[in-house]
Image (cartoon, grey):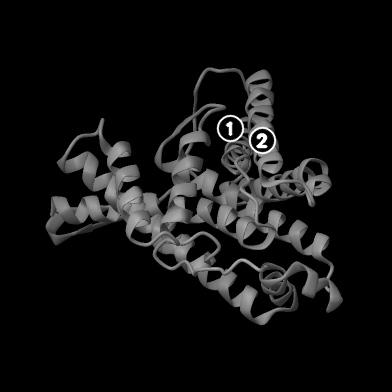
Amino acid sequence: MGFLTYLVNGLSLGSVYALIALGYTMVYGIAKMLNFAHGDVIMIGAYVVFMCMSNSGMPAVVSIVISIVCCTALGMIIEKIAYKPLRKATNLAVLITAIGVSYFLQNMALMIFGSNPVSFTSVINWEGLSLAGGALKITGNAIVTIITCVVIMIVLMWFVKNTKPGQAMRAVSEDKDAAVLMGINVNATISLTFAIGSGLAAIAGALLCSSYPSLTPYTGSMPGIKAFTAAVFGGIGSIPGALVGGLLLGIIEILARAYISSQLADAIVFAVLIIVLLVKPTGILGKQIKEKV
């Protein structure tokens, strides 16, 4: 039963990576930029939930909703102030700006919350399931995280495929200039993309810290990098790719920790990414895009 336990834990961790990876893949797919500050939005979301639950005594659901609202607003503000003026700038300028925003958020969190870790209270009050006479135990955190990830993915794919704003996102991702000619507000569409990705980051932050309850201003850094890896792994720009990449990354990491070495787990994850990209440079579900001349 040990393998099954590790597999479930891997799916749970992978679900969190997948939720975070959605923010990366949506922004890249539509705005063609890498928002490296996304991991720090997760950290801010987790702190908002922590303050609402621990300091104000609010229920978990209310705390998460407040966190979603705060992170959505934060994502839109970041896009408006830092990224919108750089629409026509080079990719390098946008990338450096994203790194700058990331450090800005980390330092703001250090100034407000301090560097000492705080103990995050889980938002899930359910012990989970005990199967096979108690040999296989699945925690409530793992079950709720996996279900939440699957439901969000289904809703998001339906939204992109069947709603007018979702169709606008697809049009902008295909060709911004053609989208403008069709009457689509490109700036509003990109802002909506940031809002959705940042809102999902709040959920990911609450679920991540429920499973790994030590919260610091650096909490979002490594999960953010790994989620970006998951997005590239699955095929950046692809919503199903974010799910596949996140789940595979989570499973590989947990199995590597269990059967090889906890110290080498991260190295193994990135080694697998390199191998996959050598074989399929666009990622598992990514598509080759031909550059226009």
| Residue at left offset 24%, top offset 55% | 7
What's the residue type where badge 1 is placed?
Ser
Residue farthest to the bottom? 162
Say left or right for 147 vs 194. Answer: left
Which residue sits at x=58%, y=32%? 54
Where is residue 111? Give x, y as percent: 68, 18
Identify which residue, 179 or 131, lies in the foreground: 179
Mark 2 or 1, nearer chain start: 1
Residue 10 lies, in percent from the top left, at 31, 51
How many numbered marks does the figure carry? 2
Q: Nearer the viewer, residue 13 or 270?
A: 270
Quadrant (top left/top right/bottom left/bottom right) for the C terminus? bottom right
Residue wearing tag 2: 96
Identity, as a three-letter code, of the amino acid under mark 2:
Ile
Whole-percent x, y for residue 147 in the image: 43, 63
Measure the C-alpha gap from mark 2 to mark 1: 36 Å
Q: Nearer the viewer, residue 120 or 18?
A: 18
Q: Is residue 151 visible?
A: no
The vertical placement of 36 against 126, above or below, is above
Q: Are marks 2 and 1 in contact (CB under 8 Å)?
A: no
Name the image quarter holding residue 165. bottom right
Name above or below for residue 143 compared with residue 160. above
Q: Is residue 162 left or right of residue 139?
A: right
In front: label 2 or label 1: 2
Look at mark 1 in the image and give the residue it sits on.
54
Q: Quadrant of the N terminus?
A: bottom left
Q: Residues within 10 Å of mark 2 (few under 14, many from 20)?
A: some
Q: Residues within 10 Å of mark 1 (few under 14, many from 20)?
A: some
Q: Secondary structure at mark 1?
A: helix
Identify the residue at horizontal 23%, vertical 50% (top origin). 6
Residue 279 or residue 216, whichever sits in front:
279
